[in-house]
Image: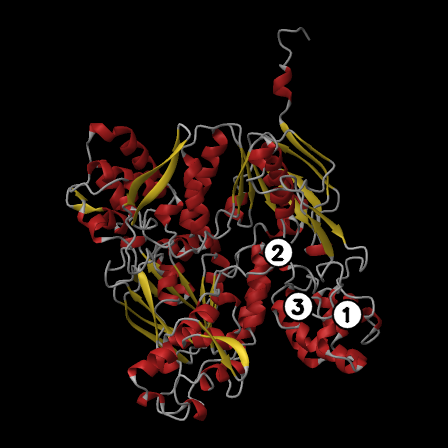
Amino acid sequence: MDDATAPHAADSHDLIRVHGARENNLKDVSVELPKRRLTVFTGVSGSGKSSLVFDTIAAESQRLINETYSAFVQGFMPTLARPEVDVLDGLTTAIIVDQQRMGADPRSTVGTATDANAMLRILFSRLGRPHIGSPKAYSFNVASISGAGAVTVERGGQQVKERRSFSITGGMCPRCEGRGTVTDLDLTQLFDDSLSLNEGALTVPGYKTGGWNYRLYTESGLYDPDKPIRKFTKRELHDFLHREPTRMKIAGINMTYEGLIPRIQKSMLAKDKEGMQPHIRAFVERAVTFTVCPECEGTRLTAAARSSKIDGVSIADACAMQISDLAAWVRGLDEPTVAPLLASLRHSLDSFVEIGLGYLSLDRPAGTLSGGEAQRVKMIRHLGSSLTDVTYVFDEPTIGLHPHDIQRMNELLLRLRDKGNTVLVVEHKPEAIAIADHVVDLGPGAGTAGGTVCFEGTVAGLRASGTLTGRHLDDRAAVKDTVRKPTGALEIRGATTHNLRNVDVDVPLGVLCVVTGVAGSGKSSLVHGSMPSGADVVSVDQTPIRGSRRSNPATYTGLLEPIRKAFAKANGVKPALFSANSEGACPTCNGAGVVYTDLAMMAGVATTCEECEGKRFQASVLEYTFGGRDIAEVLAMSVTEADEFFATGEARTPSAHKILERMSDVGLGYLTLGQPLTTLSGGERQRLKLATHMADKGGIYILDEPTTGLHLADVEQLLALLDRLVDSGKSVIVVEHHQAVMAHADWIVDLGPGAGHDGGRVVFEGTPADLVKTRATLTGEHLAEYVGA
């Protein structure tokens, strides 16, 4: 071969090579991924897909980029440890678009999370009439402040005093502080005003008569504890409810007394609702009422910011418009002085519409977006980017998408690839796997049974490969021949939440009812926002479990409680010894199992604790056994092993066995009891939540896309679980896009026909068979195609 035709050395790096990856459950995985192609990673939930794609390839790419900055800059960036891998070759810059929910801060909206709000604020500060100030004056995150005073300046060796004043005009509504809602406490839920304090007037959880919380009020000496609360004078009532923190002696002890309302606000309302104990959460839901701020009418902005308009539209109106309408309004503005800004804003809004989020509005709180919507909002940044040769990493981009929208998502992924980028996608849906240039199938099982590569090659090769994914790729659920008869109906009348248009619907009870429709058609608004009050409902939504490294499936499900008690009883010691977060903790690592060393801007190092060898307990605790096992050995068991262990014999513990059975039912048999929650995948967390809620006494279960993160083979198991729930007399309502679940339903409620203000109506109610026969709606078309009708 002569030199003229020899390829250039720079063109020979066409592969991303991974050798010996051992993150989490990966077992020395080696793969070669083609660059500038679309590679899909498949495998059952927990088989190691995220460990390979996110924790190895993407993490190392980000770490190497961070290392190019100076040590000073690295000090401000998140520190990343080097993944457990021997060789990683041919990496390019990785851009991660994951399903992490956006911050649920009450001031975070779709507009602030993207750059759309920032551009709108500049636009209004230039064109808005009357002119009220800089872009800050239109921001509901900036409060107005002003100040004046004397400053001392040194000039020419002399100290000179000067008067200075400053003021910042912000757009934050002073009443609700930019939140749009104000909270009120319903006093009737805090105390019974017909009783005196000594008669037990307080009804707040944790304020038991005789407890310290209670004595703080009865023995404060500020009012008579024998007098009914309704007879308190104005002064006494103020001291009881609103008094600022005051140091005083109560029962001979120095304590801080403060009014009941600020005390409850600090102790209960400042906490995250998900992390509360159930009885406290129920109390907060009863006692706290959220009302729209009367001053700004929920717009979060000051009157001045709302008064400044362009063509009769204020920034509050612009943010409340549906984005597709806002894009049309911006297109109608022709102002040469701000032409570059308008072009950029148009592009940003058009990207929303193109990605199928045109039905959102910019003032929608970011915390209310579903996982799939949050992920697509993050994609908007990258759609118009002129970067090429970048690695884009997506985590199940089809989550929360109707089959109709999946085609659009596929086109976007292919467009990114065609610009010369490497696209890596973790995915379960066959429609999305079908467009791959290269497939990596991990498995064969989940957890310790996974972590190896079962197949690498083309989609056609995967079909023929005989792996679990290959076998299930062409699975198509058939529509049921016979459907169950409803035992009653849940009546929803005149529902108007979000975009619903006065919807009346009877949701049948005692059957499996699926609510479907394109993304943004109003499914969640109907199911979560319009339930008649007093309905006996247990809702399992997609909000992620919050858990630290110390939380694990045993602590989250309440399984540790009966186990600790059983150990304590068998050994005649107290239960606290068997908790790694309490008295039994190894003193060296405080029960964490590892010792963290912080190395400033270098990645911190976690080394296994030498004293307890990672077992997290004191040596003396491990001498106590139950059924021949110590507590560390029990926590190292998988759910399946523990299920057998606690079922019979000397270790029989019915309460523990019940919880373990529920975990096996939802397909989590492979998890170990002591595995930190932070290492669980999204699908695993939701199923863990489902397992804990299955014990709740509700008669109606509402599940929000339970197939999220589930492999095709696991969907069958989920359907069997839903059937079992229905057969045990429960009613199950599922918000779902997966055609297998729709086909399996007894009744379908289809919302649409479009998203946003084009949706919000019921377009079909009936059995799946009727929907397939009539093909009346978009869902009907896709379901008919799926079942091959």
Who's the residue at 49% across and 46% down the image? 397
> Quadrant location of residue 458?
top right
Q: Report how far apart the C-alphas of labels 3 and 1 lie in the structure.
A: 12 Å
**Residue 10 vertical placement versus 544 (above, below):** above
Q: Which residue is mark 1?
A: 631
Q: Position of residue 278 (x, y in %)?
A: 51, 75
Q: Nearer the viewer, residue 675 or 464?
A: 675
Disc 3 is placed on an element classified as helix
Q: Residues within 10 Å of mark 2 (few under 14, many from 20)?
A: some
Three-letter amino acid code of the residue under disc 1: Ile
Image quadrant for the N terminus? top right
Amino acid under disc 2: Thr
SS of the residue under disc 1: helix
The residues bearing labels 1 and 2 have C-alpha atoms spaced at a distance of 21 Å
| Residue behind mark 2 | 678
Q: Position of residue 510 (x, y in %)?
A: 45, 77
Q: Which residue is mark 3?
A: 554
- The image quarter containing residue 127 is top left
